[in-house]
Amino acid sequence: MGAPFDYSYVFSFLPKLLSTLGVTMLIVAGSLLVGIVAGFLVALPRLYRIPVLNAFSMVYISFFRGTPILIQLFLFYYGLPEILKLVHIDLSRAPVMVFVILTYGLHTGAFMSEMIRASVTAVDRGQVEAAYAMGMKGHQAFLRIVLPQALAIAVPVFSNMVIALLKDTSLAFTLGLMEMTGKAQTLGNITQHFIEAYLALAFIYLVISFTLEKLLLRAERRLMRHEVPESAARKRFRVQEKLSYRRIIAGIRPEKGGAEL
Amino acid sequence: MKIDPSFIWAAFVNLMSAIPTTLLITAVSVTAGFMIGLIAAFARIYKVPVLSQIATAYVTFIRGTPMLTHLLLIYFGLPVLVDALSAQMGWGFKSSSIPMIWFAFISFSITAGAYMSEVIRSGLLAVNRGQLEAAYSIGMTTWQALRRIVFPQALAVSLPNLSNSVIGMLHGSTLAFTVSVVDINAQAQIVASTNWKFFESYLAAAAIFWGLTLLIERLTAIIERRINLYNRGGVA
C-alpha cells in the first residue's frame, strides 16, 4: 500500500500541515467560546436547583456525554438545517465551519458545565458564609470568594478538556472541512506517502497538546498561590503531593465520557 | 427533504444488526487495553529502569495525539512492517490477509492502554501505603498483599474512571468506519445514504449509543455499590 517509506517526506509535510493549523485552532477557540457560554447556562440551573430548567440541563448533559462526538457532528450537520427549515430559517448555504463549531461547542459545553458545577461545589461552604458574615452581597461573595478558588480547582480539568477538544477536532474532516487531519489525508492521497503524512500529523498534535498542557499548568500554579499550608517545611511536600495527585485524577479525564442521568 | 418520524424506527431496527460489532470492538480494546495499562502502570510505579521510560513515552504520545491518528498509523504502517518482517523471515504471510477489524482491535487497544494505565496508576496510588505495610507485617508476600489487599481497594477507587474509559472506547469505536468496519456508525451512514434520510438514521444511531452509555453507567453503579460494601463507615 502506497510508496515505500521515506523519511524526508515527514519534514516536507510538516510546513504543509502547519498551513492548516489556523483552521484547527479556529475550531478549538470557537468551540471553547461557545462551550463556556453553554456550560455556564447549563450549570447555573443545576447549581441553584431551578425546577424545570434543572431537568433540561440534566438531559442536555446526558445526551452530549452519552453519544459519540462523531454521531453528534452528523446529527447537527444534517438535522439542524431541516429543523430550522420548519421555522423558515435557511441554513443550507451556511459554511460547514458553523456546524462544526456549534457541535463541538455544545459538546464541550456539557463537559464544561460539569466542570463548573464540580469546582463551585468543591469550594468550602464556610467560605461563602464567612463572606456573608462580613457583609458581602451574593454576587460579591461569588465573584471575590468563590470564583477565584473554583477557577484554581477547575484548571486541571479545563486543561484536559481543551486537549480533548483539540484531539476531537480531527473528526471535522468527515464533514469535508479542510483542517489538519483532512490536509494530511489529502497529502497522503496525492503522494501515496500515508505513513509519513500521519506521522507528521501526530507530531504536530503532540507538540500542541504538550504546549497547551504546560501553559495551563503554569496558570494553575499561579492560581494556587493562595494555598499556603501551616509550616514552611511541610509546605513543599504536602502541596506538591496534593497537586500531583489532583493532576493524575484530572489527567484521566474523569469528566470525559459518561451520561449520569 | 422532510423529516420522516417512522423512518427513525426503521433505521433503529436496521442498526441493531451492527450493535455486536461495536460491542466486540469495545470489549476487545478495553480488555487488551487493561492488560497493557496494567503493565505500563506497574512499570511506572515501581520505576523499572528502561520499561518505565518507555511506558511514560507511550502514555505521553498516545494521550497527546487523536485516536484517529493511531488508527490511521496502524492501518497504513502495520502492513508495511508485517510484510517486511515476513519477507525477511520467509513466513509467506501477507498483510492483506489481516481482516480489517483487526486494525481497529490493535489500534484501539493501544489507545485504551495508555488511558487505562493512568486510571490504574491513580487507583493504586490512592490506596494508603499503610495497607501494604500492614499486609507485610502479618507475613504476606508482595504478591499476596497486592492481590488480596491493594487490588480490591484500588479497583473500588478507580471504578468510576474505568467506566468512563469503557464509555470513551465505546464512543471511540465509531472511528472504525475509516477502516471500513461496519459498526453502528458505518451502518448509519449506509442506511442514510441508501435511503437519503440522514437525520433520521443518525438520530437512531445516537439513541442506540445513548442507551448503551446509560446501561454501562447503571451497571457501574450496581457494581460500585457492591464493591464498596467494606467502606461503609458508621457503626452497624
Image (cartoon, rainbow, N blue to C red):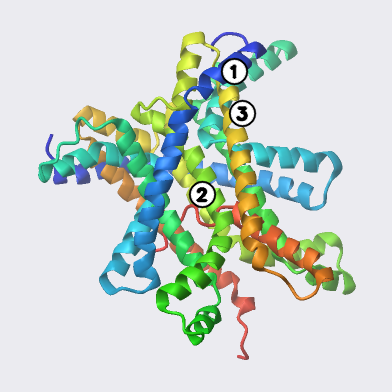
Numbered mark located on residue A161 in the image: 2
Q: Pick the residue in front: B191 or B62.
A: B62
**Kind of residue indicated by mark 2:** Met
Q: CA distance from mark 1 to mark 3?
A: 11 Å
Which is closer to the viewer, label 2 or label 1? 2
Picture quarter with the C terminus of chain B: bottom right
SS type, badge 2: helix
Q: Chain of mark 2?
A: A
x 57%, y 8%: residue: A3
Within 10 angstroms of label 2, few (less than 14), some, or many (20 or more) residues?
A: many
Picture quarter with the N terminus of chain B: top left
Numbered mark located on residue A203 in the image: 3
Per the image, the residue denoted by label 1 is A196
**Kind of residue indicated by mark 1:** Glu
Q: CA distance from mark 3 to mark 2?
A: 20 Å
Which is closer to the viewer, label 1 or label 3? 3
- Is residue A184 in view from this perspective? yes
- Is residue B93 in view from this perspective? no
Residue B150 percent across, percent down from the top left: 74, 65
Q: Chain of mark 3?
A: A
Whether residues under marks 2 and 1 lie with C-beta atoms below 8 angstroms apart, the answer is: no
- Residue under disc 3 on the same chain as residue under disc 2: yes
x 19%, y 32%: residue: A92
Q: Residue furthest bottom?
A: B235
x 40%, y 24%: residue: A178
Left or right placement of residue B204 versus residue A252 in this view: left
Q: Pick the residue in front: A61 or B197.
A: A61
First in sequence: mark 2 vs mark 1: 2
- Residue under disc 1 on the same chain as residue under disc 3: yes
Q: In which quarter of the view is residue A199 placed? A: top right
Left or right placement of residue B103 versus residue A93 in this view: right
Q: CA distance from mark 2 to mark 1?
A: 28 Å
